[in-house]
Amino acid sequence: MSGLTKFLPTYKNIWLLSFPLIVAGISETIIGITDTIFLSYYGTTELAALGLADTIYVISLFLIFGFIDGIQITIGRRAGEEQHKNIGKVLNQGLYLLAVISSLMILLVLHVIPLITIELFQSNEIYESVELYLSIAIYGLFFHAFNLAMSAFYVGISRTRVFIKATIILAVTNISLDYLLIFGNYGFSEMGIEGAAVASLVAEIAVSLFLITDIIRHRYIKTYGLFIFEKVNFTIIKTLTMLSAPVSMEALIESLRWFTFFLIIEQLGEDALAATTIIFSCYAILLIPIDAFSETICSMVSNLLGQKDEKKVTQLVLKTVALGYLTVLPALIVTIFFPEYILAIFSESENITQTIITTLMIVSFATMLAVPANIIASAVTGTGDTMINLFIEIIVSLIILSYTYYVAIIANLSLNYIWFAEVIGWGVCLLLSWLWLKSNLWKRLNI
């Protein structure tokens, strides 16, 4: 590193920043995976409902995701300029926004979403299970938003090792409570899908408490001026909103795309929906390192531009893509050559297992395209040109959903053909993102 918060695009620096994010990504995915594993042994209805409940939860995060990206881009830019106190001001104002957004989203999910889903879902049992889960898990939105904001801060100042400890806390808390509450072990009441929701909520709270403790212990409050809640700074709010609005819409469209994807498959029956929930969990594991490198490059591109060193952006992208392939390769090998061992963790049903194995080959191919596509798209986000990412997401989502509807509902083909939509989507994303990055049109922006 050069100075306190400046970044140099070497393989070592990219890896040192990304590895803790990979670990953190594992922890975030662990919540979904452990819920999936435990509920797969609890009941097919609960397992099927979990996939839909998770997509609704992610939809409720769309504004939060947008502002988190805006916070991270701005902090990365200020870090490159070594304006340390301004980093704290950005985070503090961002927390104001996130508190308001979280409150509104919780009210929406509790009181409006049920009126919509009761008309959309074919199965009353799935509808009731989804509502049981969300009525508890949605309160985790407050703590999830805070944890994401802290993640943006740590990534922005190139201090990501804290995520390793946070991961351990999240994983241990969630897995332990899943085991105790879903089945009612060791004297606890059997709560089923509600137990999974409680476990997720408590795990997010535990991580929030840990991150606050870490910030106090390292005296980041003094160095960066964190948690000094002054009056609303409309200049910062405007900057964050301009950056975040397109990203929020992009997150909403992506979330709605997955919800619609699951909704289409729900029309095919509980077994197809349960199988898709398991496939999605496996897919999420494969995407963990890709998402970590994407988060790193978003912040580091902004950091380089803050240093007025835009010539190194392409170099950073190519090195990050290379590291992405090296990191995801072991998981791909296991998925392609030993899928039965992975699926044995999730389900004992031979029908579901055989359905999934072929589809995992398709998902593996999609992951190979996701490495450069996701990383390059995140590099474009790091330039601050978030509107073009929204445009790309709209195109990708329209193509994916049109294909999915035709294959699943009209042509009535199997799941492996349906999941090929991901291959098409990442291919389109890769082409459009690379063309835009090489066009240099993003240089017109000033943040």
Image: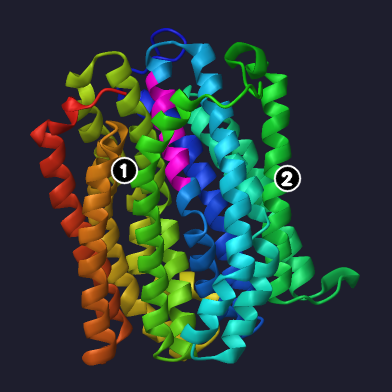
Q: Nearer the viewer, residue 385 or 116?
A: 116
| Residue 300 position in % (x across, y down) | 35, 27
Mark 1: few/some/many CA within 10 Å (<14, 14-19, 20+): many
Q: SS for tag 2?
A: helix
Magenta stretch, main secondary structure, is helix
Image disc number at residue 324:
1
Viewer can see residue 151: yes
- Say which quarter of the image contains residue 69: top left
Residue hosting label 2: 206
Under mark 2, the amino acid is Ala
Q: Residue furthest top?
A: 3
Which element carries disc 1, helix, strand or loop?
Answer: helix
Residue 68 located left or right of residue 49: left
Q: Position of residue 405 (x, y in %)?
A: 26, 81
Q: Position of residue 247 (x, y in %)?
A: 36, 46
- Residue 433's place in the image compared with 423, above or below, is above
Observer-nearest residue: 69 or 48?
Answer: 69
Q: How many marks?
A: 2
Quadrant of the rendered structure where residue 186 is? bottom right
Foreground mark, 1 or 2, reads 2
Residue at screen point 61% across, 40% down: 146
Neighbourhood count class around disc 2 (C-alpha, 10 Å): few under 14, some 14–19, many 20 upward: some
| Mark with earlier residue (1, 2) | 2
Q: Position of residue 156 (x, y in %)?
A: 46, 26
| Residue 32 circle label | none
User: Magenta region: which residues?
Assistant: 65-77
